Image: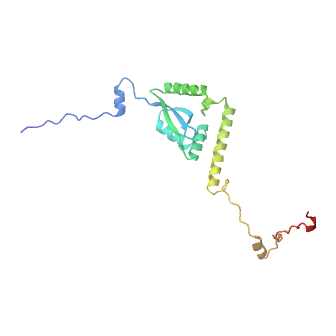
Amino acid sequence: MTDKAAPAHKWKRPSRRAAARVGSRPAPSWWVYGIIDPRTNALFYIGQTGCYSRRRSEHLEGTDQISGLVIRQIIEAGFLPHFVGLECHDREESALRAEIFWIELLLSRGVALVNSQAFDGFLDRRSKRQSETQKLTDMQQLRALANGRTATRTRPKPTKPISARASSGKPSAAKTIQTTPKSRPRPSAAGRP
C-alpha cells in the first residue's frame, strides 16, 4: 500500500492587486481622464478620480455643472460621451498635479474646456452655464416638437365650432361669414385695342 501524502497547502493564483503589490510600487489607483464629445470629437473636460467607474457613472447622470450640462446635451442628441484615461498615479497629489498640467496644456493650445479652471471668474462661468442650459432647453423643446408634443407640454383648450355654439341655445356673438368668392370686374371690350 502506497499512501500519497496530501499537500500541505494548495497553490492559488494571486489576484491582480496582490500581483501588483509584489513589485516595488503599489497598484495605481488615481486616474486623470478626459471626456470627448462624440459629435465633434473634441475633448471638453479633464478630471481626476480615485474610482474611475463611479466617477464615470456620476458624469453620465448629468449635473448642473457645465460639464454635466454638456453631457446631458450629448445624451439628448442620442450619443454617449467617450471617456479616455490619460494617466494613472499611485498618489492623489500626483494625480492632482497631472490634472492641472493637462488642463493648462490644453488651454494653452486653444482647446475649449469646460473645467472651472478654464474660465476667468465667476461671471464668465455663470455666463457659460446659462448658455449651456439654454442649449439643452432648446434641444429638449425641439425633440418634444419633433415627437408631436408642444414645447410647454400643454395642449390648447378645444373650442366648439360656431354651429355648435349657435345650437346650444346660448346667444352667439359670432356672425355668419359668407365665403363665396367675389367676382372680379371684367374689362370691357371697348377698352381693348
Q: Is residue 188 visible?
A: no
> In the visual, does 81 lie left or right of 10?
right
On screen, residue 179 versus residue 189, left or right, reads: left
Please count the marks in the image: 0
| Snapshot quadrant of residue 79 | top right
Q: Is residue 92 above or below residue 41?
A: above
Please indicate whether residue 153 sits to the left or right of residue 174 in the image.
left
Residue at the (75%, 73%) spot, across then down: 164
Which part of the image, by quadrant, shows the N terminus?
A: top left
Extreme residue toward the front, this view: 193
Left or right: 88 in relation to 20? right
Percent of width and height locating residue 136: 63, 44
Nearest to the observer: residue 182 or residue 89: 182
**Does residue 124 show up?**
yes
Counting from the top left corner in percent of width and height, residue 38 is at 55, 40
Q: Residue furthest top?
A: 24
Q: Position of residue 124 (x, y in %)?
A: 68, 33
The residue sitting at 93% across, 64% down in the picture is 191
Q: Position of residue 127 (x, y in %)?
A: 68, 36
Question: Residue drawn 70% across and 61% down?
Answer: 156
Outermost residue to the left: 1
Q: Quadrant of the C terminus?
A: bottom right
Compared to residue 171, the image places residue 61 above or below, namely: above
Q: Quadrant of residue 63?
A: top right
Is residue 148 positioned above or below 15 on the image? Answer: below
